Amino acid sequence: MKLTDLNPRWVGLHNWSSESVYRIGISFDSPTTGRRIAALFAPAIDPDGLAAKYQWGEFFPQSRKWARTGDSFETLTLTPSLDFSANGEWHGCITEGRIT
């Protein structure tokens, strides 16, 4: 299954005065229940270098962040696996935009 089949949305900075992109996570519909789930990742998708410009450093901490490669829904890979099973949800992988 493709990630794009699960209504993905970026998590990031919204409604501020810049047109720059700064994405720190993703949310999507669970492939098992359809409920919305989300994961923060590092490094952020930051093509305009906002973190360095504003010296944010680790401004958006979370107890769990996944390592990210790829910068689109079609190329995104998060490691390790995403395990939401403690909440009765999906446990699987996002690899090159595919859900397994």
Image (spheres, rainbow, N blue to C red):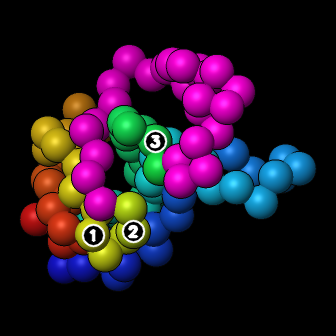
Q: How many marks?
A: 3
* Residue highlighted by disc 3: 44
Where are the magenta residues, as a range?
46-70
Q: How far apart are marks 2 and 1 (CA)?
A: 5 Å
Q: Position of residue 81 (x, y in %)?
A: 14, 44
C-beta proximity under 8 Å, tags 2 and 1? yes
* Residue highlighted by disc 2: 72
- Say which amino acid is labelled 3: Ala
Lateral position of residue 14 relative to residue 59, left or right: right
* Residue highlighted by disc 1: 75
| Image height of 72 relative to 37, above or below | below
Going from the N terminus, do you reach mark 3 or mark 1 first?
3
Q: Where is residue 96 in the image (x, y as percent from the top left)?
A: 19, 68
Q: Residues within 10 Å of mark 2 (few under 14, many from 20)?
A: few
Q: Residues within 10 Å of mark 3 (few under 14, many from 20)?
A: many
Q: Position of residue 48 (x, y in %)?
A: 61, 50
Residue most extreme to the right = 17
| Image height of 39 relative to 26, above or below | above
Could you tell me which residue is drawn at 38 percent across and 18 percent down? 63
Instruction: Give the quarter of the image for residue 93.
Output: bottom left
Q: Residues within 10 Å of mark 1 (few under 14, many from 20)?
A: some
- Say which amino acid is labelled 1: Thr
